[in-house]
Amino acid sequence: MELTVDSPLDLHLHLREQAMLSLVAPFSAAQFAAGVIMPNLVHPVDNLQRLRSYRQQIIAACGNQPFTPLMTLFFRDYSRDELLAAREEIIGVKLYPAGITTQSEDGVRDFDRIGDTVALLEELDIPLLVHGETSGFVMDREREFLTVYQWLAETFPRLRIVMEHITTAAAVAFLERYDHIAATVTLHHLMITLDDVAGGLLQPDLFCKPIAKTPQDREALRRAVFSGHPRLCFGSDSAPHPRHTKECCGCAAGVFSAPVALPMLVQLFEENGCLERLSDFLSANGRRFYRVEPPPRRVTLERIPWQVPEQFETVKPFLHGQTLRWRLKNQQ
Ligand code: NCD
Ligand code: ZN
């Protein structure tokens, strides 16, 4: 049995640089027509020159696969001229609160001072992508940040805002309030709760920001995604880290889900009896909100079980060792 998905998109993807880029990019390039590329490199992608060079590196790492990198700039104070020059080459600008996650030290420290740049994004119709967490208690961070989203939504009513990787029932409910806000949801937050991360022996491979939340939160996410919410889109937040930064004191945050993303999503939607809604979540909702049309690409999966490898070179994938029901056609 086969299943074909039209132009699946991964709207939140970390590809890193150099050897890690070469290792991980082919997984996403084999499964997706396009991906929104996160700019939190060691030196953030915060100017056009670096963005162009990074884009070329990604295309080279994808080999012959027809994968379109949709580039983002790291939020800082930008002038109108800078944003005008970048507008045609970016899908959005990604805002990180300073220090809240991997390589975000150059992020925003004072939200009272971002208004001028955000107003330019609104004027130039450039989407603002947001890592929405405060530095409060880890389970409350996303809910607390909703006041910032509310301020953004009401102060900038024409700005398209993407709440990245939402994890809570509160965020799902908040989404109802503003048509100009969309949200991405990861595969792992549809599957795990805090119990999977820390309820038994600690699982560094499941540790990420935002941390997985309660069963009730996961249920709210699932319900919204599986019922076909028109402003929820898939963003894997696949975030590879080498073993030595995961299995150590001070474990890095990030789940490397790229190798299993599409097969496991198909399985989840099938298990929940809503396969007919998969392509909206994977493609149509994102294309509509971002107003992008990457080159079309049909990706075919076949219902042949395969076991997820334990490790790819230095990185452990999400669901390593587990058997999945669907695999990419032509997968080795
Ligand atoms: C991401 C990373 O490693 O770059 N980590 C994560 O836990 N999700 C950054 C991010 O998206 O927060
Ligand atoms: Zn991320």
Image (spheres, grey):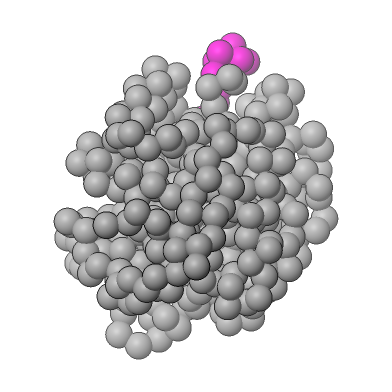
- Left or right of 204? Residue 36 is right
Determine the image quadrant of residue 18.
Answer: top left
Q: Which residues are magenta?
A: 74-86
Residue 154 inside the magenta-drawn segment:
no
Q: Residue at x 43, y 50 (%)?
A: 31
Which residue is nearer to you in this view: 242 or 152? Answer: 242
Say which quadrant the C terminus sits in. bottom left
Q: Is residue 64 above or below residue 96?
A: above
Q: Of 254 and 325, which appears nearest the observer?
A: 325
**Compared to 153, does 304 lie above or below?**
below
User: What is the count of numbered marks?
Assistant: 0
The residue under the point 40% across, 21% down is 52
Q: Position of residue 67 (x, y in %)?
A: 44, 37
Q: Tell me if 40 is positioned left or right of 34 in this view.
A: left
Q: Is residue 87 left or right of residue 135?
A: right
How far across and down, in percent of the image, does residue 79 sit? Answer: 58, 17
x and y percentages locating residue 281 in the rendered image = 64, 56
Side of 42 relative to 235 (left or right): left
**Corner quadrant of residue 256:** bottom left
Please check the rendered image and state whether residue 78 is part of the magenta-colored stretch, yes or no. yes
**319 is higher (above) or lower (below) than 76:** below
Viewer-nearest residue: 294 or 290: 294
